[in-house]
Amino acid sequence: MCPYMKILLFPTIVALVAGVGVFLWGGAAALMLFLLLATLETTLSFDNAVVNAKILTRMSALWQQRFLTWGILIAVFGTRLVLPVLIVAAAAWLTPWAVVQLALFDPVQYGEHLRHAHVSIAAFGSAFLLLVSLKYFFNDRKTVHWIKSVERLLSRWGGIEAIEIALVLLILLGASFLAPHEAAAILAAGLVGVVLFIVIQGFADVFESGAEHATEVATKASVALFVYLNVLDSAFSLDGVVAAFAITTSVLIIVAGLGVGALFVRSFTLMLVRAKTLDTLVYLEHGAHYAILGLAIAMLVGIFVHVPEVITGLVGFVFIALAYLSSRREYLKQTA
């Protein structure tokens, strides 16, 4: 077996066990919903895998493995179970225990509360993801450009300190004026996303530049980047949790399906790192950040009008596919 394919063995076993459990619990219909959610989570999150892979290259091998083991527990139980409960509790002024009871015994009502919290979720996620993508493009030290006319211009503007933060804050302010009844939720949740990005990114930079020894750098930076990756996963996935209630109101099926999908995405991420895929496909990272920018814009627009998940997924797929083709063409040109 290919050593990189061995990474997929664990998520495949988990998927089979979870699938059998869902089938025994709810029959064939529940199994089909589980497979649909797992497939959607896996296919629509490939841009997340590419960005995660680039960050993982800055982490030690030990923390790369912890990203797949400890991280998946955070992804399944934290992002897809605990965090939605806390968001619903804050938005509906309920205790977390009351929300847990709703999730277990009245999932329809729980889904309604979660949808009512959509504005806060979208504001947080869009602010965080906008910063992820804009920080990549507003970089005056960036020398490799895919869409050259656009990226060269953005790279030059990157010389202005914290321009991406200023731009995101202005976007949040504009959104609050367009939705005055939701202004407080937009600004509060959006600012949480901005502050969280600044703090985590800052810790990673400080650890990488301030430690005295290479092992100390790797360990301290890996911890900060591990936290950053899990927050990034939350920003990607929270809107998907809300959308999952349009497919089924069963919390068990949602957690199982999205959890298995998240495990496959993290395994693909590790495969990209171990195979050094981003070293040969030079524009794949660019395509992923364009896809993230598209997702962030879709989440922001989703505050005002409904944006179907399929559109968001197609935008990401198109950017990733085009970036892959451009990367292959560039690789063949350089090796000819």
Image (tube, rainbow, N blue to C red):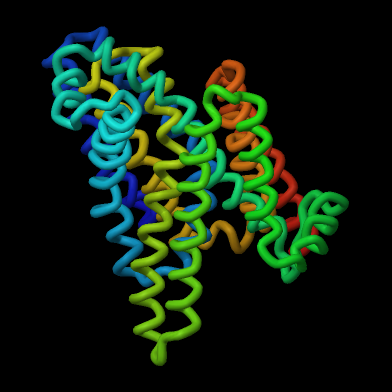
Q: Where is 317 relative to 212, above or below?
A: above
277 or 214: which is nearer to us? Answer: 214
Q: State the residue at coordinates (67%, 40%).
A: 171
> Farthest right residue?
149
The image quarter in which residue 81 lies: top left
56 or 321: which is nearer to us? Answer: 56
Q: Is residue 320 visible?
A: no
> Residue 307 placed where, x, y %?
59, 19
Determine whether, in the image, residue 1 is placed left or right of residue 130. left
Q: Where is 259 relative to 56, above or below?
A: above
Q: State the residue at coordinates (33%, 51%).
A: 7
> Residue 151 placed where, x, y %?
79, 54
69 or 166: which is nearer to us? Answer: 166
Determine whether, in the image, residue 156 is placed left or right of residue 310. right
Determine whether, in the image, residue 45 is placed left or right of residue 80. right
94 or 289: which is nearer to us? Answer: 94
**Quadrant into which the C terminus falls:** bottom right
Counting every numbered tag in the picture gives 0
> Farthest bottom residue?
212
> Residue 147 placed where, x, y %?
80, 49
> Residue 183 placed where, x, y %?
55, 31
The image quarter in which residue 178 lies: top right
Q: State the residue at coordinates (32%, 51%).
A: 6
Q: Is residue 139 visible?
A: yes
Q: State the residue at coordinates (31%, 43%).
A: 75
Q: Where is 331 relative to 112, above or below?
A: below
